[in-house]
Amino acid sequence: MIAEIFIFELLLIWSYFFIAIKKSFSITTNVIFTIFISNISIITFITTIIMGLVKFDLFFVIVSVSIIMISINYTYDYFKRRYEVYSKKYYLINKIKPVLDCLLILFISFNIYY
């Protein structure tokens, strides 16, 4: 039972994480990201919720999804604010971000494929 709860929570975190970070990518990488990764994450998120409804209580699933969504959004907002502070302070960070976006997409795609 503990393993099922852990897998359920891990899948929720994994799938909603990619849904939440979608808005941080640039326009060109966002198209690639939306086509390949974000659509799969939305399907995984919905499937995970359905799996949770089959295996667990409705209240547990609602609380788990709410906690995951709120915590990931707050974490994303925190790092976004930190990035904005550092990007104003250090000019080089704005030049590195598109490269890191592409590397992240490449890394995720590679891990999904293999």
Image (tube, rainbow, N blue to C red):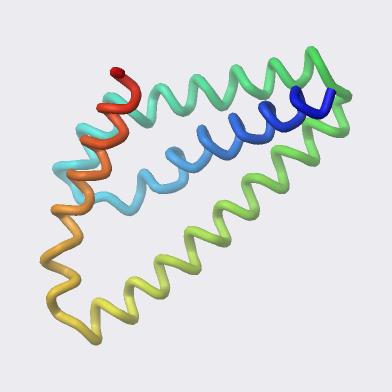
The picture places residue 97, in percent across and down from the top left corner, at 20, 60
Q: Which quadrant is the C terminus positioned in?
A: top left
Q: How many numbered circles does the render carry?
A: 0
Please name the residue shown 76% across and 29% down the image: 5
Residue placed most toward the observer, 48 or 112: 112
For image coordinates 34% across by 29% down, the residue present is 37
Residue 104 spot, x, y in % from top left:
26, 44
In the rendered image, the residue lying farthest to the bottom is 89
Measured along the vertical axis of the image, is residue 50 above or below residue 60? above
User: Considering only vertical position in the picture, is 95 above or below 20?
Assistant: below
Q: Quadrant of residue 98?
A: bottom left
- In this picture, is 2 found above or below 28? above
Q: Would you say 65 lies left or right of 25 here?
A: right
Position of residue 18 measured from the top left corner of the image (x, y, whole percent): 43, 39
Q: Answer with the quarter of the image where residue 92 lies.
A: bottom left
What is the x, y in percent for residue 48?
63, 22
Q: What is the quadrant of the N terminus in the image?
A: top right
In the image: residue 26, left or right of residue 6: left
Q: Is residue 7 left or right of residue 86?
A: right
Eyeballing the image, is 31 above or below 45?
A: below
Q: Please tell me in which quadrant of the rendered image residue 81 appears.
A: bottom left
For the view shown, which residue lies furthest in the top direction? 54
Residue at coordinates 26% horizontally, 36% vertically from top-left? 107
